Image: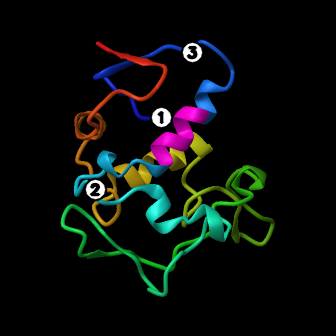
Amino acid sequence: MLACTACQVRLPNSALPAQLGRRTFHDASLSASGTQSCASCHDPARAHALGNKLAIQLGGADGQAHGYRATPSLRYLEHNPPFRFDEEGAPNGGINRDGRAASLAEQAERPLLAAHEIANATSEEKCRNSMTCPPGTTPT
């Protein structure tokens, strides 16, 4: 998961991770452009899939970088089996387009650092792009 040196997380109750995740998912200030959040491409009102008519979404630091494919839904990812090769040698399971993420936390980090998506150069840059620390955190 992304390590944020700008904010120190405090976990006062079990609801905080979900609240922090929801806020992060919708927070465009975390992007290099300041205009794109996860929800920009994964619309909660549309099963966390594409919310517009573009076949391939634009992202990146200037908002003009083309993605590689249509935006997939994020629903049911927690049910994906771990990545493996089946008895015929075909790849199966995993998270991300090539199965390389071993967990949802690892998958969530990739778009934040991908040049064609949220486009932060480092996890520290992601933290600096946020104007304030998320709820339940304190500045360090």
At horizontal 57% and vertical 15% (from top left) the residue drawn is 11
Left/right placement of residue 140 relative to residue 136 reads left
Outermost residue, left direction? 62
**In front here: 121 or 89?**
121
- The magenta region covers 19-25
User: Which of the two labelled residues, at mark 1 and mark 2, occupies the earlier sequence position?
Assistant: 1
**Which amino acid type is shown beneath numbered disc 3?**
Leu
At a point 74% along the width and 56% down the height, the residue shown is 80
Q: Earlier in the sequence, mark 3 or mark 1?
A: 1
Pointer 2: residues within 10 angstroms few (<14), some, or many (20+)?
A: many
Classed neighbour count for the residue bearing mark 3: other residues with Cα under 10 Å, few (<14), some (14–19), many (≥20) = few
Given contact means CB atoms under 8 Å apart, are the residues at marks 1 and 2 in contact?
Answer: no
Q: CA distance from mark 3 to mark 1?
A: 16 Å
Q: Is residue 34 above or below residue 72?
A: above
- In whole angstroms, how far apart are the C-alphas of marks 2 and 3? 28 Å
Q: Which mark is residue 11?
A: 3
* Residue marked by disc 1: 1
Which of the 4 image quadrants contains residue 95?
Answer: bottom right
Picture layout, residue 32 above or below residue 9: below
Q: Label 2 is placed on what type of residue?
A: Ala
Give me the residue at 49% from left, 20% from top: 136
Residue 139 occupies quadrant? top left
Residue 69 screen position, x and y as percent: 47, 79
- Label 2 sits on a secondary structure element that is loop
**Left or right of 70 on screen, residue 33:** left
Task: Name the secondary structure under disc 1.
Answer: loop
CA separation in Å, label 1 and label 2? 16 Å
Q: Where's residue 37, x and y in %?
A: 40, 56
Magenta stretch, main secondary structure, is: helix
